[in-house]
Amino acid sequence: MARQALGKGLDALLRQTQEVTAPAQTAAAAGASVQKISLDKIIPNRYQPRRIFDEEKLQELAASIKEHGLTQPIVVVYDAGMDKYEIVVGERRFRACQLAGLKEIDAIVHKALSNQQMCALALIENIQREDLNPIETALGYRNLMSQFEISQTDLAKYCGKSKAAVSNALRLLELPEHMQEALQDGKITEGHGRALLMLNDPTKREVLFARLLKNKLSVRQAEEAARALVRPMAEKLPKPPEVVSFEQDLQAALGTKVEVRYGRKMSKGMLIVHYHTLEELDNLASRLKTKLL
């Protein structure tokens, strides 16, 4: 039912993706033309999911373009109202050409594309290149779902991703803005973001976030730290009767307070025997030795 609700829009769009981004020699067959366009006449794609462009990599691409030229034209659509060409695919190449000091760029020019097509093509091109950071990908997914009113399941199929991958990406948008910025800047990874989402308490989430930045925890360490922050809440739940009875029996035998602490699984935990003076500790040690021997 969700797939039928798409109509022909996204299905047709994805069938035409190769045509829209076709090489120069097949552009005419795709209903487009290849032209040299002044860089001053070109504007970025308003639906560009990429928010951050790596300056070092752009400089490397600019140097390559200076040495070898532009090997693949960008794709643009002409906006008659503004008398400008809006980028559909190839903003990195456009920016690198600017850095290289070029005045013109080869571009495949399409006469008309819908806003939905602009949004989808920009996202799909970047996803296929695996060229976005996790927040950019998540924002792109959300925009595409909104534009086409599709489910996560259908979006996953169209983008060649698992439903879990799409769902996990979208969940990152639940993080506070400063944590999303850290993800975009590469200070933490997507795995760290998922570990932060294990904590519903904003205060505990901030504690873990600060620890991630300070101690450079691995993803596994972050997950363990998140579970440790959740665990005290679980320990406040009533202990099973058999555990309480075990504690009472040991307290009676040793004459001091005894605690059994455990995590989610009772197969592992700690047995804590309290003492208040060194003399009491000596007495406990003697009792235990007597019982063991």
Image (spheres, helix red, strand yellow):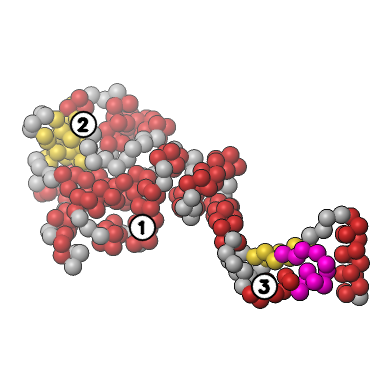
The quadrant in which residue 106 appears is top left
Q: CA distance from mark 3 to mark 1?
A: 39 Å
- Circle 3 SS class: helix
- Circle 2 SS class: strand
Q: Residues within 10 Å of mark 3 (few under 14, many from 20)?
A: some
User: Which residue is painted at 15% across and 33% down in the image?
Assistant: 85
Amino acid type of the residue tagged 2 in the rendering: Ile
Question: In the image, is 42 to the left or to the right of 287?
Answer: left
Between residues 178 and 11, which one lies in front from this camera angle?
A: 178
Q: Is the N terminus in the top left, top right, bottom left or bottom right quadrant?
A: bottom left
Residue ID for mark 3: 243
Question: In the image, is 95 to the left or to the right of 8?
Answer: right
Q: Is the C terminus in the top left, top right, bottom left or bottom right quadrant?
A: bottom right
User: Which residue is painted at 16% across and 53% down in the image?
Assistant: 13
> Sequence-wise, which precedes: disc 2 or disc 3?
2
Residue ID for mark 2: 43
Residue 141's x, y, as percent? 29, 51
User: Which residue is painted at 55% across and 51% down in the image?
Assistant: 222
Q: Which mark is residue 167?
A: 1
